[in-house]
Amino acid sequence: MSELNERLRRYADARAGRISDGDADSLITRALAKPARRPGWTRHGLNAGLALGIAILLIVGGVVLKLQLRGQTAQGPGPTPRPPAAVPHEIVNLDDPSQDPSLESPFDLKTGKVLTPVQRWVLPQSRALIVYSTTGCVSSTIRVVDRLTGRNTQPGVTLPDCYDTPILLPGTAVLLSHSRVISAQQNQVQDLGEVLYDWSTARIVKSYAPPSAGFTGGLVSTDGTRLYTLNPYVDSPVLDIMDLVSGTHVAHVPVNLMQVGLNPGGLGLSTDGRTLFVNLGDQLATFDARTGGVGPVLPFKDLKPGSTSALPAWLVPIDADAKQGFEPNHGIAIDPKGRWVVALGADDRTTEGIWIFSASGSLHLVQHVGGGAGFRGIAFSLDGGVLYALDASSNLDVFDPRTGRQIKHYNTTGNFLGIGGVEPG
Amino acid sequence: MDEELGARASNPADFERLLRANARSMLRFADFVLHDRSAAEDAAQEAFMIAYQRRGTLRDETAFTAWLRTIVLRECLRWRRRRFLQVLRLTDRVVAPASSDPAVQVDLERAVRRLSPALRAVVYLHYYEDQTLTRLAAELSIPESTAKTRLYEALRRLERALPGYAQSGEQT
């Protein structure tokens, strides 16, 4: 036991020792008494007043609606209402903390059921990558398996030290974080950076120095040349961009991540790979994905739908394949067709909910839905037609991004942390 | 503990028993996360009230502690945000030394205060409640890799802040 660990224990013990059962008990008594403080007649009076207010609002609303309809009829037929988007037959893969990290739980939208867990890191030809470490990280094993049967398709490889947080790159490369446990008891870990591992030849082909912000997973550009990382668990988070070809740091940009909420943050690339979107929890920041040049920042709460922000030329258009990543539980989603960027607000009354930005022309807010509800993950359907959102009760909602309207609600059985991905049903 | 009580969480009286059985642990947790006793009491009281109101949403009673822990942590973070918006500086508050040996603890307390609440939560569960990374990840509803990262960051920052612990390279 190291001295620091022992000091921390003593410190926590001493601090906790100042709180007695009586202190906690009185809090419970106060907390449970709070809702009942208001006398019954006040409650009834308030309810009656509220009912009267709602009735007046409905009558006034009806009159206004009637007048508007009359006006529209006089002007001729209006635009045909859009038909609601259909829920596609797709599988939404959910992160289940009770499962091995290499697995995710498929949720079948057609049947509304959670299926048997499948491998998360999918390789070409229906194969999957599995990376696991022994207790204490003495060694790690990397396997390439058949995704359905779990059988090895080539011999597994065991390496000394810890290798984890795989990020699959185009071709046969995977980026793995590399660390060494110096003393398990003392929680001493040496961060050795990242390695580029070629799973087809089972060899480490390149090593990189650790990003200065700390490696907590990241997002790789579609051409595999840039690594974007952002460590949200420090007081002064920094966005790092690394050139994976030369191993040099391209940019090191401080970002003002909202330090509230359970799962803020998230990185997403525009479909043309030129713009990096960073969900800061209370605003959507944009960067030049190649240089880290700072682009417009759109705060959530001060925006009203329709607010716009002029974008420099390098930010438009958005028209290629979508990419999303970083702690995919999962604060940001990019429409595969480049029409929308969606961010989950941090877990605070002023920002929570789903913020839908239109990326057609200038980036601007078009919808804020689900305010007052916590969400853990978002992802677009494969054609970008609908948006999936996992709520705090692990239920799955389907939204139409054009209107922000909820199309369908699925109750799931389980406790899920986020959406890992979407695939055809 | 939850199973031993054998309570039905949807029943108000049984739910209250569950709450009371976990209240001290949660208040201690809130106190460590916020490092401010009165703030912790505010946050915990709010969390208990919310938990009581939302008791019907608890589907798995064996997950009561994790469910309540998440609510308490959320209220702690909200409390901190509200105070931040009111431009109150928590670090200026005077808190009594937590140990009978203030000379030893003062540096550590200052260093722990500098950690973000999310990091303090992991430190508390690991060092005070002796929870494994797997268990504390489940309690905080975060992936195990995230828990590991947070503990790693917390220790690295503490070592850097405390005299005599800074090590060469990236060791923590």
Image (spheres, coloured by chain):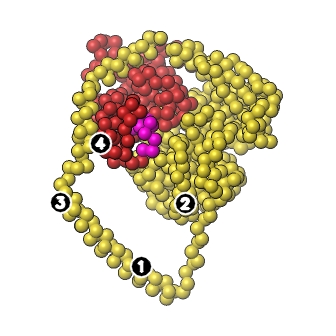
Chain colours: A yellow, B red
Label 4: which secondary element: helix
* Residue B73 drawn at (x, y percent): 39, 36
* Mark 4: amino acid: Ala
- A116 and A245: which is toward the camera: A116
- The residue sitting at 75% across, 23% down in the picture is A157
Give the quadrant of residue A192: top right
Which residue has dot 4 on it?
Answer: B13
Q: Amino acid at mark 3?
A: Trp
- Residue A270, image x and y in percent? 64, 50
Q: Callout 1 environment at 10 Å: few (<14), some (14 to 19), or many (20+)?
A: few
- Asked if marks 4 and 1 fall on the same chain, the answer is no
Position of residue A278 relative to residue A400, above or below, is above
Q: Amino acid at mark 1?
A: Leu
Q: Secondary structure at mark 1?
A: helix
Residue bearing the label numbered 2: A408
- Residue A279 in the image: state x and y as whole percent: 53, 45
Q: Are marks 2 and 1 on the same chain?
A: yes
Q: Determine whether A400 is above or below A239 in the image.
A: below
Q: What's the distance in space between the residues labelled 3 and 1, CA to CA?
A: 36 Å
Q: Name the residue: 74% across, 29% down.
A: A143
Q: How busy is the neighbourhood of tag 2: few (under 14 within 10 Å), some, or many (20 plus)?
A: some
Judge depth for marks 3 and 1 and give the one in front.
Answer: 3
User: Neighbour class for label 4 at 10 Å: few (<14), some, many (≥20)?
Assistant: few
Query: Which residue is disc 1 drawn over?
Result: A65
Q: Which chain is indicated by disc 3?
A: A
Q: Gap in Å between the C-alphas at discs 2 and 3?
A: 39 Å
Are tags 2 and 4 found on a single chain? no
Q: How much space separates mark 4 and mark 1, taking CA atoms? A: 48 Å
Residue occupying the point 77% across, 42% down: A126
